[in-house]
Amino acid sequence: MKKTNPWLVLFDTLFVMLLCFAILLSTMIFKGKSDAGIHYLLDLPTVGLTFGALVIYFVYLLPRSDKGLKLTIRERYKNTATDQP
């Protein structure tokens, strides 16, 4: 089985998250010329706290998900090598 580069997985994940953030931010900025539009305020400490939480989440999740995936694959395919003629 080919080993996946963890930096590539991290880049892919962050890229998708950045695209989602850009879409949400663009809808907030380009809200239209209507007076009935909702006005969004970005609070810098809240944004910083959100990004900090995402970093902590990835630091916690990535090593554990890799171990869990390897364990699942090992358990699923451990008898296939002996079943083959």
Image (spheres, helix red, strand yellow):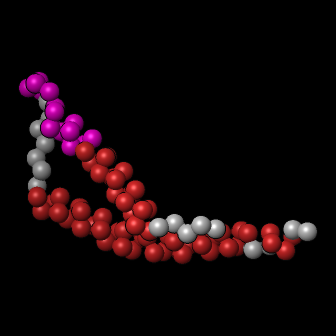
Task: Please give the name of the residue rendered at 24% of the width and 62% of the height, measured from the top-left corner.
Answer: 51
Q: Nearer the viewer, residue 18 or 42?
A: 18
Region rendered in magenta? 23-36
Q: Quadrant of residue 75?
A: bottom right
Q: Nearer the viewer, residue 66 or 50?
A: 66
Task: Please give the name of the residue rendered at 11% of the width and 38% of the height, measured from the top-left corner.
Answer: 39
Image location of residue 76, percent across then percent down: 71, 68
Q: Residue furthest left?
A: 35
Task: Please give the name of the residue rendered at 21% of the width and 43% of the height, measured from the top-left corner.
Answer: 25
All told, the count of numbered labels is: 0
Q: Residue 45 lies in magenta, yes or no?
A: no
The answer to whether 75 is drawn above or below residue 28 in the figure is below
**Quarter holding the N terminus?**
bottom right
Question: In the drawing, does residue 84 fall left or right of residue 25?
Answer: right
The answer to whether 55 is drawn above or below residue 32 in the figure is below
Task: Please give the name of the residue rendered at 24% of the width and 67% of the height, measured from the top-left corner.
Answer: 52
Q: Quadrant of residue 40?
A: top left
Q: Quadrant of residue 31?
A: top left
Q: Residue furthest top?
A: 34
Question: In the drawing, does residue 56 fall left or right of residue 1?
Answer: left
Q: Residue 32 lies in magenta, yes or no?
A: yes
Image location of residue 82, percent across then percent down: 85, 74
Image location of residue 85, percent across then percent down: 91, 68
